[in-house]
Amino acid sequence: MINKYHHTLNILKFKRSSDRNEDFLGVKEDESSEQHRSIIKAHKAAAPEWNFKFEQINFVAGRRGAVVEDDFYNKLERLRVQAGKQDKILLAHVQRIYEAHDAVIRSCN
C-alpha cells in the first residue's frame, strides 16, 4: 500500500497462528518480520531515490478466531484509517476469518 503524501510503502501481511499460547501475537509478529526482511531490503535497494519509508504491518488471527483488538486498531491507525471506519473494518475482518473456518469445517464432512 503506497502513501505518496507520507512517503511510505506499507507491506501488509495477514497470518494465522495457533492461539493456544498467550504470546501467539508476538511470536507471529517476529516470525513475519524475519520472513520479509529480505523483501523490504530489496525494495529499498531497488529505488533509493524514492526516499520512501518501508514498513511491514502484520495482521494476525488465531486459528480459533482470536483477534487482539487493541493491536488491530493500532495497525489501522498506523495505516491512517479514519477512526469512524475502523469498527467496520474489524467486523469485516473477523467475519472473513469465521467464513474461512466454516469453509474448512464443511470441507471435512
Image (cartoon, rainbow, N blue to C red):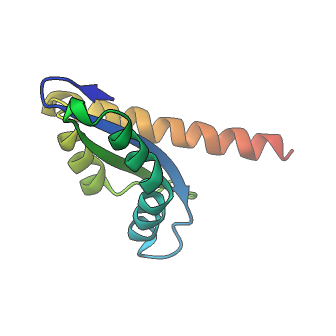
- Provide residue 91's location: percent of width, then percent of height: 37, 36
Q: Residue at x 17, y 34 (%)?
A: 80
- Provide residue 68's location: percent of width, then percent of height: 34, 57
| Quarter of the view holding residue 34 | bottom left
Q: Residue at x 42, y 76 (%)?
A: 22
Q: Decide: is 47 above or below 94.
A: above
Q: Residue at x 24, y 55 (%)?
A: 70
58 to the left or right of 104: left
| Quarter of the view holding residue 67 | bottom left
12 to the left or right of 5: right
- Residue lying farthest to the right in this orientation: 109
Q: Residue at x 41, y 74 (%)?
A: 23
Q: Decide: is 3 above or below 108.
A: above
Which one is nearer the viewer's eye here, 18 or 40?
40
- Provide residue 53's location: percent of width, then percent of height: 22, 41
Which one is nearer the viewer's eye here, 56 or 90?
56
Which one is nearer the viewer's eye here, 55 or 83?
55
Which one is nearer the viewer's eye here, 19 or 57?
57
